[in-house]
Amino acid sequence: MNEEERYLFDLWGYVTVENVLSEDELTALNALIDQQNYPEPTDDKIYSQRFGGFMDWESDAYRKLLNHPRIMPYLKGMIGSKFRLDHAYGILMRKGNPGGTLHGGGTPYDPAQYYVFRNEQMYNGLTVVSWALTDMLPGHGGFCCIPGSHKSNFRCPSRFRPVANNPKCMVGVHQKAGDAVIFTEALTHGTLPWEASHYRRSILFKYSPGHSAWGQGRYDDALREKMSEEDQRLMLEPPYVSNRKLVVE
């Protein structure tokens, strides 16, 4: 992370990394989703608009995102040199799908998702890399947040939670296809209704410090064997402290 990116992440709770994926990579990633023949997403945000399993697909295109070389240094700067994949899923939205209320925030403190700064270093709990496979530009909808709320000392007022008609402190975070937004789960964030004629396609990888976990799941050996690189396999290990091997230089 450069000086500007560190400042903005500390200030806002997120940073946008532009043009991470090439046109060829986007074409390949989108084609793999097309092959799944998912049903039209409904207004059910959990069971219809989300999908998983892409780490198990025969192609390694999605597995390569796990330790993408452009992203790994950011995760080191935000989480520390040892981190693990907590969980991952994709989001599909079509025009008219509603958003959701804002959630998260610096207060009340959550030991699994937090932001602290000590000794000239930031430390985050659950941290998200959100990959845009399609454009998410002004007027489209999608990811939104209250910038700076990861450091708030007061609970977010309930009247600020809805995303509809909430311009007072909430903003949309825009991405071009191929951009990645990295944010701390301590940020108060949510989803705006999808208004664009094209589908929203986002892939979210959520990382935790090596000693902690937010989700209950554990990755099996069969998935580890599909990983082509050692640090990918190490990021699928369960949480622990003693002799943890993954160290991002």
Image: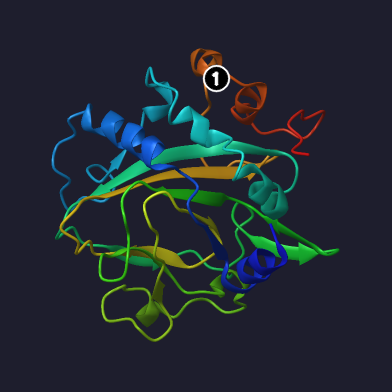
Count all numbered tags in the image, as a single digit: 1
Horizontal side of 229 relative to 169 (left or right) equals right
Please tell me which residue is depicted at 15% across the width and 49% down the height of the picture: 42
Q: Tag 1, which secondary structure? A: loop
Does 3 appear above or below 28?
below
Question: In the picture shown, does residue 6 fall above or below 238?
Answer: below
Badge 1 crowding class, 10 Å Cα cut-off, few under 14, some 14 to 19, many 20 or more, is some
**Residue at screen point 86% across, 63% down:** 119
Quadrant that contains the N terminus: bottom right
Residue type pointed to by label 1: Met
Residue 95 in view, yes or no: yes
Examine the rendered structure and indicate whether residue 90 appears above or below residue 194. Answer: above
Return the x and y of residue 139 as percentages of the image width and height. 25, 71
The residue beneath circle 1 is 227
Judging depth in this view, the residue of 211 and 247 nearest the camera is: 247
Quadrant assignment, res 160: bottom left
- Return the x and y of residue 51 as percentages of the image width and height: 31, 37
The percent position of residue 102, horizontal first and vertical second, equals: 39, 67
Q: Quadrant of residue 176?
A: bottom left
